[in-house]
Image: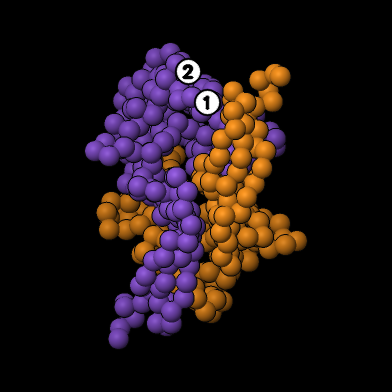
Chain colours: A orange, B purple
Amino acid sequence: MGRSAFPRVTGEKVIAKTKFLEFKELSYLNKFGDERRWSLVSRVGGSRAVMIVPFYGEKLVVTREFRVPVGGWCYSFPAGLIDDGEDAAAAAERELREETGLNLAEILAVSRPVFNSPGLTDEAVTMVYARVDGTPSREHLEADEDIETLFLDREQVVALMNDEKCFIGAKAWIEFYHFVNGK
Amino acid sequence: MGRSAFPRVTGEKVIAKTKFLEFKELSYLNKFGDERRWSLVSRVGGSRAVMIVPFYGEKLVVTREFRVPVGGWCYSFPAGLIDDGEDAAAAAERELREETGLNLAEILAVSRPVFNSPGLTDEAVTMVYARVDGTPSREHLEADEDIETLFLDREQVVALMNDEKCFIGAKAWIEFYHFVNGK
């Protein structure tokens, strides 16, 4: 059989499940055709998320949110799961409003779904770069959400990146790096 | 009690475990002090990884690797777990050599550990931007690894981003976006 037949996933077993996540073990044939196993986590009902990189004039809009897995407050961007029947742009507009109260004024770029940690999970996120406007508000937050909205210029982003006590999301950190060093 | 006491993680239970991953449920007190649960996945032995963004002259070095959770070939950068006693720069140099055969010539920037998907996992990655040199080689790959090394100029990165059939890692996609649009 040709090399193109391997690697290949051959089976899937759910090991454990909670309301929102499934822990699975996949069987696959490695490059030699030998059977191996790989464990991963999936979101129940589909692992499709959206993240907005919001520009407010010359400033970057950054969220600060308590993240249970990390055990602390994490700096990132507005993000959330894409609902059934929604496209990424509509989800971005909705999540931006829910989490910050801001309005999506103009979409600058949209990625395809890309993978947060493809060795660990099939979770995919669509990146939406956008100009935003409006006034921040917490009135659309869900009961369990606790999200602050910050408007940061380059100096403030540098200060955040240099503050070792702050937790920062990886995609946000990369955007911070380019926001500070770009152009 | 002041608002600063909440949210707060109060307990941890391992629901299931495989050789490399643990599936956990944390108890926490939400912003109102009400107890809630949150499930997540952790890497056994610590969730510390490194990813290299390698520049080879004017080209970007990109890896193509079969990723079982995604069920296909995924374009990204050299990456791997940081060994005990290793710092991020040493891990970057080692993983770059193992996965591509290339040599880390000059480190341009190093992030702090940042979080791939802080609602899903405590997995953290340190980003290392570097100039690299040498000749690609597959001789240091582990038996189960199957990684190709590509040297892409801007046009080739644009073509990759436009090819809907390709799976791309999220951090890599963001770097591609800035590689193409930057400066």
**Any mark on residue B147, and which?**
1
Percent from the top left, x then y, of residue B42? 43, 53
Left or right: residue A110 compared with residue B173 = right
Nearest the viewer among B121 and A66 is B121
Q: Which residue is mark 2?
A: B138
Residue A37 visible from this viewpoint:
yes
Q: Quick one: SS at disc 1?
A: strand
For image coordinates 43% across by 82% down, the residue present is B34
Percent from the top left, x then y, of residue B67? 57, 37
User: Do dots 1 and 2 share one subunit?
Assistant: yes
Percent from the top left, x then y, of residue A182? 43, 40
For image coordinates 46% across by 65% down, the residue present is B25
At label 2, the amino acid type is: Arg
Nearest the viewer among A137 and B25 is B25
Above or below, B173 against A157 in this view is above
Question: Mark 1 or mark 2, which has the lower sequence index?
Answer: 2
Please report, as a chain letter, where disc 1 is located: B
- Marks 1,2: beta carbons within 8 A: yes
